Amino acid sequence: MTINKRWLRKTTASLRVLITKEQELLILERFGEEPEPYEWSEQDIFVQIQNFLGCGEFVKKAEPFSLQANLLLDGENF
């Protein structure tokens, strides 16, 4: 699923949330195209937008498991 300006404005209005033009552009840039080879679900988009509006950042992708495992083996916290 991808979004457009109309979908975003309708959704933010239904959530009773005001967003700036800058936030709108960042959200549309992020969700205007599918992240190949994956596909956004509507829930993914809602959660990411809520997080972005709450703290100013999108949910960051987790580090690959092998990197996390190496950090745990080295005794470092991540």
Image (tube, rainbow, N blue to C red):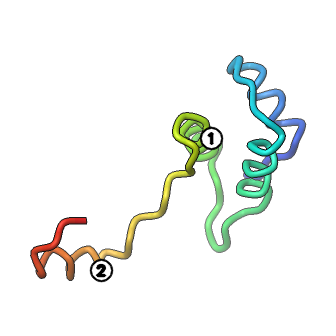
Disc 2 marks which residue? 67
Sequence-earlier tag: 1 or 2: 1
Q: Nearer the viewer, residue 18 or 28?
A: 18
Of the pair 47 and 22, the residue shown nearer to us: 22
User: Which mark is on residue 22?
Assistant: none
Inspect the image, locate mark 2, and give the three-letter code of the amino acid beneath it: Leu
Mark 2, Cα crowd under 10 Å, few <14 / some 14-19 / many 20+, is few
19 w.r.t. 65: above or below: above
Image location of residue 36, percent across then percent down: 67, 72
Q: Residue 57: where, in percent of width, then height?
A: 56, 49
Along the line of sight, the residue nearer the viewer: 16 or 44: 16
Identify the image quadrant of residue 34. bottom right
- What kind of residue is marked 1? Ile
C-alpha gap between disc 1 and disc 2: 27 Å
Q: For residue 49, which numbered disc appears in the image?
A: 1
Q: Tell me the element at label 1.
A: helix
Residue lying farthest to the right in this orientation: 6
Judging from the image, what secondary structure is the residue with disc 2 in?
A: helix
- Residue 41 pos. (x, y %): 62, 48
Q: Is residue 39 above or below residue 23?
A: below
| Count of numbered labels shown in the rendering | 2
When asked about the image quadrant of residue 52, the answer is top right
